[in-house]
Amino acid sequence: MDILLYILIFIMGTVFGSFFTLAIYRIPKKQDITHTHSYCPNCNHKLGFLDLVPIFSYIFLLGKCRYCKTNIRPRYFILELLSGFTFVIIAYMLNMNINNLRPMLLAEGAFMALYLCFIFIMAGIDAENRKIEKSISMYGILLSIVYIIYLCVIEKDSIFRYVIYLAFYVIILILDTVTLKRYAKNSYVHGMILTVLTMVIFTGEYVVINTIIMTALVVAINLLLHKVANIRKRVRSEKKDYGKNINYGVILAIANILNLIFVLAWYKFFI
């Protein structure tokens, strides 16, 4: 029976993954993500049910649009697959099975699914546009507030632990508003800080510290390899600001999910 549960969770994860691809494409374009029917970005033809089955539609259509035969970017297939496996792995680490589907465990699973929405969409938009979308940051903040209320009311957690994070949210939002008024754009750094705060609330300080360390190591290796490549080509770094082109949100998201899985696995198998 547990196998059937995890198959269901995998399917649910792929459906979320399909939504992620839609949101990543539409949100930066300020398009509706809930009411507008899915369509091919190339020919604008509305997609039918068989065109929208996660993973299988991509395979059976051989990675092409049914209507205009344009190649569909592999990211759709990859993201759906990754989302499905991520949902299964985290559900397994949370010890979900048929016999212990208690309301509190289901609530934790639901919050984790909504948190993964934040992580995947934030990273996807950053990968495409190198931008931390303000609307996604606001979604993360609102979700964090609801989660804090749940923890304090249902699980009887102390609210004092979260007051500091809520205060930081307010401070960064004020700074970001000032930056927006002065430079007519949102700050990438402020978006990263808001992302880290949301990560702390959902995955804890230990996971986030390791996330930041891993992110810093990956960035440092990336910069080092870039410098070595320039030296081998005997080219002076024409882009001293190469670091500004790195998608920090993507690296941060991957590091956070990996560290979360590691910590959950540690508690599951060793504690």
Image: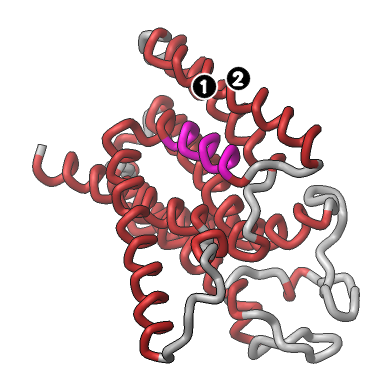
The amino acid pointed to by label 1 is: Phe
Asked whether the residues under the numbered discs 2 and 1 touch, taking CB atoms below 8 Å apart as contact, a structural biologist would say yes
Which label is found at residue 170? 2
- Is 226 positioned to the left or the right of 15 in the image? left
SS assignment at label 1 = helix
Q: Nearer the viewer, residue 2 or 176?
A: 176
Identify the residue at horizontal 71%, vertical 42% (top origin).
Answer: 186
Residue 119 sits inside the magenta stretch: no
Q: Nearer the viewer, residue 153 or 233?
A: 233
Identify the residue at horizontal 57%, vertical 74% (top origin).
Answer: 77
Where residue 37 appears, x then y in whole percent?
Answer: 85, 60
Residue 197 sits inside the magenta stretch: yes
Q: Residue furthest left?
A: 270
- Is 129 positioned to the left or the right of 16 in the image? right
Q: Which residues are magenta?
A: 189-199
Identify the residue at horizontal 76%, vertical 69% (top origin).
Answer: 49
Residue 103 placement: quadrant = top left
Where residue 120 appears, x then y in whole percent?
Answer: 54, 54
Label 1: few (<14), some or many (≥20) within 10 Å?
some
